[in-house]
Image (cartoon, helix red, strand yellow):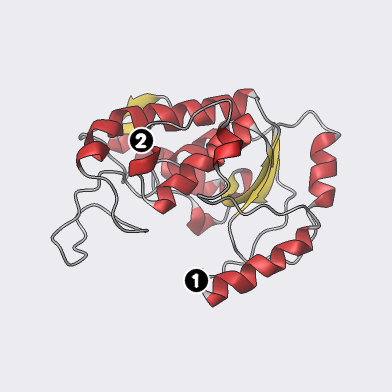
Amino acid sequence: MSEARRRCLETLVSTQCDIVVVNNDNLAPWMATTPLHPAYPFLSPIHRSDYLRAYFMHHHGGGYSDIKRTSQTWLPAFRKLKESSALGVGYPELRHGVAKIARSRVEGSYYLLERKSSYLRNYLLYRKLKLFHGRLIGNCAFIFKPGTEFTSRWLAIVESRLDILLPHLRNHPARYPKERQGVDYGDGPSKYTVPWSLLLGDILAPLSFQYRTKILRDLPMPDFCEYE
């Protein structure tokens, strides 16, 4: 972990929550009842994190945060969620944070949540989501109740995409933390097949928009400066 990341991690005490940094050393107990998808070992660390957000929110619930600078308590957000019928709470998405869902393809196909889609449909939805970005929640911090319709759909969509990707991942697993297909890391263009936002932003943006009346947007926004 870089020094900048370490400083950001130290600020998470401001949330006034119990902090657990999930890593390879302590992951196993969290998956005691439900195994991870078989594609998990082949994913890059970035995409493992994307998958684990859906897995943890569905099976365990609670809060998730990226390691970014945080300066406010999360306790009011937890309390408000507990006392409401809402499914989760996040911070309003930034306009430039909306995933570019029209860029992601798998085996030549575009996807929109559970279904195959098209470039045009995804591009038009992307423009709409940017227009109403404040009704979405961001990817970097949120709280969810476990086992809800929202978390069930979220995890099912992620795992259905991993089902499609698994044969390719077995042949071309990730070798670098932020690996992207086609980028030359010194040993030829990468054949890693997972588009950057396919497992998180491409799902959470349209899904949180669908459930916008059932998700609160009262969580303090993390600081996106100087975290790497």
Question: Residue most toward the left?
Answer: 188
In the foreground, 206 or 175: 175
For this view, does 80 lie left or right of residue 154? right
Q: Is residue 205 visible?
A: no
Q: Is residue 16 visible?
A: yes
Residue at figure coordinates x 62%, y 23% from the top left: 149
Whole-angstrom CA distance, mark 2 to mark 1, is 27 Å
Q: Is residue 145 above or below residue 16?
A: above
- Name the residue tied to disc 1: 228
* Disc nearer the start of the sequence (2/1): 2
For this view, does 72 lie left or right of residue 205? right
Report x, y in % for residue 207.
53, 33
Report x, y in % for residue 148.
65, 25
Amino acid type at mark 1: Glu
Q: Is residue 126 above or below residue 6?
A: above
Quadrant housing residue 173: top left
Mark 1: few/some/many CA within 10 Å (<14, 14-19, 20+): few
Q: Secondary structure at mark 1?
A: loop
In the foreground, 44 or 76: 44
Amino acid type at mark 2: Ala
Residue at figure coordinates x 52%, y 48% from the top left: 131
- Mark 2 or 1, closer to the camera: 2
Q: Secondary structure at mark 2?
A: loop
Disc tally is 2
| Cβ atoms under marks 2 and 1 closer than 8 Å | no
Report x, y in % for residue 100.
39, 48
Residue at figure coordinates x 57%, y 67% from the top left: 224
Mark 2: few/some/many CA within 10 Å (<14, 14-19, 20+): some
Report x, y in % for residue 217.
70, 46
- Name the residue tied to disc 2: 39
Q: Which mark is residue 120?
A: none
Quadrant housing residue 86: top right
